[in-house]
Image (tube, rainbow, N blue to C red):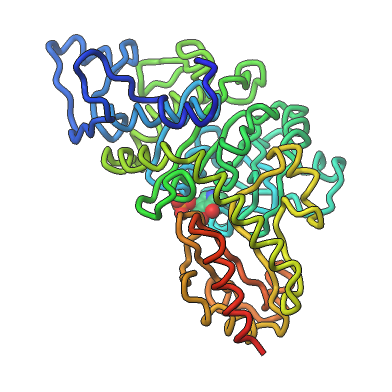
Amino acid sequence: MNNYKIETKCIQEGWKPENGEPRVLPIYQSTTYKYESGEHLGKLFDLTAPGHMYSRISNPTVDFVEKKIAALEGGVGAMMVSSGQAASTSAVLNIASCGDNFVCSAAIYGGTTNLFAVTFKRLGIEVRFVTPGMTDEDIHALFDERTRLVFGETIANPALDVFDIERFAAIAHAHNVPLVVDNTFATPVFCRPFEFGADIVIHSTTKYMDGHATVVGGVIVDSGKFDWAKAGKYPELTTPDESYHGVIYTEQFGEAAYITKARVQLLRDLGNSPQPMAAFILNLGLETLALRMERHFENGLAVAKYLENHPKVGWVNFPALESSPEYDKCQKYLGGKTCGVVSFGVKGGREAAMKFMDSLSLANIVVHVADARTCVLHPASTTHRQLTDEQLVNAGIGADLVRMSVGIEHIDDIIADIENALSKVD
Ligand code: PLP
């Protein structure tokens, strides 16, 4: 790996053309690959020779984008999947089976909470949530001999809590399990969790990495640093896999054991693979990721400061604001920066928040966050509308809460839109 800065890696990593080849990443729109001999193909099936055999498992276009993302995060390998949900699913299933459990920060994306607490439960895998205010002692008490990993989100969606990566890495490693971090909102431009002790990183690439709200996707990145053999509790990585003629992943693939197994077993069996066209589009987004993140942050900060001083706004949550309880962690893990998502409360509760949202014109009402366009959502009347006001408060989502994903338009236009909408609120 070279020493390029992140901005350069966003452009130059991944596809590196040889003499006379296309400068731009080609789309290999093929499910299948040709071989000169059956013997060679046999070696692919034994995992003793590298190469593509079928696009459910790997594809050249996808492979070059995986290499770029691995370089951005500083990992030994990456595996793209069809969505962020598929990334969380495979990251856990790669090392946890029925009867196992894992420890997870409660401040994570609601879809992930559902996956872990409902669907994994049906598979016999138990999630044990770390709630705010728990001491290290409380967290250690959640572990037992069947605990297989710890999971958290660098910047939680939508709570915007900043995950204390070093603290949780130390706790995980004390129990010989890896720390898995969802780095979707921070992106490797602002935080590289491996530098703070995380072992596996996942992303919903649907968000800032794509950045244009065009393609749903996900990725898992392996730091290569976790010692699976020494931990002594991952037989799926350290004992023979009969479906590949007895391959032992830790012995044959060394530091890439985890990510290789995820691909050759889980992508093969679950089939949640990405399409070459999706990888191509994601790559276009990645080329401008560093530029866009800086602008998302600048605009987000300007919006947060504007709202903080507005008489019709009750509170503002943005980790880079000095008033934020997340400020110190934002300095430590994100270099004082954060993504463009701001949440705030409009005085007057539900009606006022809805009136504000309906009065915006540049900012659109959408369920998505983290693309180039400014967008807004009022969870109490949409994603969480089934909850009463009291239940909303318990869930940390007040009826007044508006979540704004600040885009990369000119800041004057964004603020003028907000100012106009707030002027319509009584
Ligand atoms: N992780 C985070 C932090 C998210 O915000 C999301 C989606 O919003 C996901 C994972 C799930 O990703 P996807 O929608 O690509 O399946």
Residue 114 point in image, percent of width and height: 56, 58
Q: Residue, x 35% and y 40% (percent of image)?
A: 284
Residue 107 point in image, percent of width and height: 68, 54
Q: Can the viewer see residue 350 in this picture?
A: yes
Q: Residue, x 57% and y 48% (percent of image)?
A: 185
Residue 130 sits above or below residue 333 on the image: below
- Comparing 168 with 64, the one in front is 64
Please state the total of marks drawn on the protein image: 0
Residue 361 sits above or below residue 50 on the image: below
In which quadrant of the rendered image does the C terminus lie?
Answer: bottom right
Query: Furthest-bottom residue in view?
Result: 426
Residue 213 point in image, percent of width and height: 40, 55
Q: Can the viewer see residue 119 in this picture?
A: no
- Comparing 262 with 288, the one in front is 288
Residue 381 sits above or below residue 214 on the image: below
Horizontal placement of 157 versus 136: left or right? left
Residue 173 point in image, percent of width and height: 73, 27
Where is residue 196, by image quadrant? Answer: top right
Q: Residue, x 49% and y 35% (percent of image)?
A: 220
Horizontal placement of 269 versus 234: left or right? left
Residue 251 sits above or below residue 304 on the image: above
Where is residue 29, by image quadrant? Answer: top left
